[in-house]
């Protein structure tokens, strides 16, 4: 009975997702050829049911499930909601991949649901063992999704993802083993208790750094970042949209919880994370400025945005954590809008190079206007939510005092460079050309996602005070 109670109070959304994994596997065995068109609707139903069930789990006070291996609270509920919303949009724009895969459509959604399940488990993990298992489950699912398309670029991207995941897992286990040797436990709550009165040591600092560096793989940050543009280029557009949000959100959820426990005993950790964040922004900005392919450009853009969110993790206060959560919400809808706009263009013209967007402003003014707002939000310019998101993150660093002013200046400089890289596609869309570009009206779901999420990038700025207050409540629950 305790097992059923744990499921009802903490794991109902995950159980529904797991059930739909088996439903898709069953349908792929017996009904894949005749009913492949229903696979997208079944996936939408599963995500909506899981999202609705979040209202039935216990968020206050924190619920400890399965021998304290997993928890459920306001913080985990928030990240699970982000994961399900991003997955819902990814499924909505998957119409073309369903039509292309046909007999394998159910297999695609089975793998997608495995990735959703792994991300939700990673959010709720309360010890290093459950974290590692969820970490590997998510990496394997994402690797399979990125290699679904039958071309060498997809296979190359999947192989790079797998190699980086293996190295990150090795570092994670190596660091965890030393933390276990020092504290005598792998449970986060027990580790926090055992560290009370602990003065810290070089060995604990080294093991903590290994764990944090391993987590950089999940949040697409330096040093595990070279795989991002190759995986995004080789994967299908819906998979690219999924990979650009869901694993990153799950990674930041676990990273913040680990930092809350160990940051007080490794003072240099905050500085290391800020340096990694700045290096991530610089790497993403430099890579994006050199790109001529929109999918690779979106990959480097994701690296830049992850770097800004990682800046808030280097400060780790309720204010900075609330800023990161607000940034994550803005990034969710802005990045979905970017990928949905790219999907609309690719499905209409069959091209994804940046030069193919030339002259788009003269033939599709509504699409161009919406894309400009999306790119402005990613660049951090008003009146979009991206401006306030970057403001909250940078102001958190400014609050640290004069010693951190150099980091703030470097972040501002990199932010200015990032503005330049996002104006490249805008400039190309206004260049004149003799070629006439048209966007088909058949892409109903993609158009809805694109314009709906674009509108939200502006609305999130208008109602930012309420949203930030909500994010502060979530941050204090951690």
Image (cartoon, grey):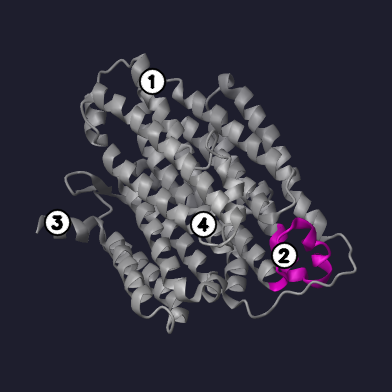
Mark 1, Cα crowd under 10 Å, few <14 / some 14-19 / many 20+, is: some
The Cα–Cα distance between marks 4 and 3, rounded to whole angstroms, is 36 Å
Is residue 11 something one can see in this rendering? yes
Tell me, yes or no, whether the two marked residues, 4 and 2, touch with CB atoms within 8 Å. Answer: no
Is residue 459 something one can see in this rendering? no
Residue 73 point in image, percent of width and height: 29, 49
Instruction: Work out which quarter of the rendered image holds the N terminus and state it.
Output: bottom left
Q: Nearer the viewer, mark 4 or mark 1?
A: 4
Asked whether 306 falls inside the magenta stretch, the response is no
The Cα–Cα distance between marks 4 and 1, rounded to whole angstroms, is 37 Å
Residue hosting label 3: 3
The disc label shown at residue 1, or none: none
Mark 4 or mark 1: whose residue is earlier in sequence: 4
- Majority SS type along the magenta span: helix
Mark 4 or mark 3: whose residue is earlier in sequence: 3
Mark 2 or mark 1: whose residue is earlier in sequence: 1
Asked which secondary structure carries label 4, the reply is loop
Q: Nearer the viewer, mark 2 or mark 1?
A: 2
Tell me, yes or no, whether the two marked residues, 2 and 3, touch with CB atoms within 8 Å. Answer: no
Q: Is residue 141 left or right of residue 63?
A: right
Q: Where are the magenta residues, as a range?
A: 348-372
Q: Nearer the viewer, mark 4 or mark 3?
A: 4
The disc label shown at residue 205, or none: 1
Asked which secondary structure carries label 3, the reply is helix
Residue hosting label 2: 351
Residue 320 point in image, percent of width and height: 48, 37
Residue 315 point in image, percent of width and height: 48, 31
Q: Nearer the viewer, residue 161 or 329?
A: 161
Residue hosting label 4: 147
The Cα–Cα distance between marks 2 and 1, rounded to whole angstroms, is 48 Å
Asked whether 354 falls inside the magenta stretch, the response is yes
Instruction: Work out which quarter of the rendered image holds the C terminus and state it.
Output: top left
């Amino acid at each position: 009975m305790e097992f059923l109670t744990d499921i009802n109070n903490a794991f109902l959304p995950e159980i529904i997702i797991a059930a739909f994994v088996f439903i898709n596997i069953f349908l792929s065995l017996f009904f894949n050829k005749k009913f492949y068109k229903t696979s997208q609707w079944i996936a939408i139903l599963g995500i909506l049911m899981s999202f609705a069930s979040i209202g039935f789990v216990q968020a206050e006070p924190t619920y400890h499930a399965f021998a304290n291996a997993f928890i459920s609270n306001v913080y985990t509920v928030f990240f699970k909601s982000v994961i399900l919303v991003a997955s819902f949009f990814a499924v909505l724009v998957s119409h073309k991949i369903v039509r292309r895969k046909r007999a394998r459509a159910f297999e695609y959604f089975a793998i997608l649901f495995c990735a959703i399940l792994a991300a939700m488990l990673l959010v709720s993990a309360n010890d290093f063992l459950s974290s590692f298992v969820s970490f590997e489950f998510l990496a394997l699912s994402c690797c399979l999704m990125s290699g679904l398309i039958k071309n060498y670029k997809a296979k190359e991207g999947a192989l790079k993802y797998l190699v980086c995941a293996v190295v990150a897992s090795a570092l994670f286990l190596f660091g965890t083993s030393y933390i276990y040797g020092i504290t005598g436990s792998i449970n986060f709550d027990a580790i926090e208790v055992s560290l009370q009165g602990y003065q810290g040591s070089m060995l604990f600092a080294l093991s903590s750094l290994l764990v944090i560096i391993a987590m950089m793989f999940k949040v697409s940050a330096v040093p595990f970042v070279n795989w991002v543009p190759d995986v995004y280029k080789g994967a299908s557009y819906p998979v690219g949209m999924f990979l650009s949000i869901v694993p990153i959100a799950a990674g930041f959820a676990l990273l913040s919880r680990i930092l809350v426990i160990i940051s007080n005993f490794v003072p240099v950790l905050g500085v290391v994370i800020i340096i990694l964040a700045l290096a991530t922004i610089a790497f993403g900005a430099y890579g994006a400025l050199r790109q001529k392919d929109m999918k690779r450009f979106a990959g480097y853009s994701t690296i830049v945005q992850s770097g800004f969110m990682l800046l808030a993790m280097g400060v780790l206060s309720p204010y900075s954590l609330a800023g990161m959560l607000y940034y994550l919400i803005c990034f969710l809808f802005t990045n979905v809008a970017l990928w949905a706009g790219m999907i609309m263009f690719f499905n209409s013209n069959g091209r994804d190079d940046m030069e193919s967007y030339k002259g788009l402003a003269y033939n599709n003014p509504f699409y161009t206007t919406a894309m400009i707002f999306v790119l402005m939000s990613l660049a951090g310019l008003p009146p979009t939510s991206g401006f306030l998101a970057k403001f909250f993150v940078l102001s958190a660093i400014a609050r640290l005092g004069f010693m951190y002013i150099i980091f703030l200046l470097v972040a501002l400089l990199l932010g200015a460079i990032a503005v330049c890289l996002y104006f490249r596609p805008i400039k190309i869309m206004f260049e004149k050309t003799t070629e006439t570009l048209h966007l088909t009206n058949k892409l109903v779901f993609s158009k809805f996602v694109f314009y709906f999420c674009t509108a939200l990038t502006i609305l999130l700025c208008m109602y930012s005070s309420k949203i930030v207050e909500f994010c502060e409540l979530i941050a204090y629950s951690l």
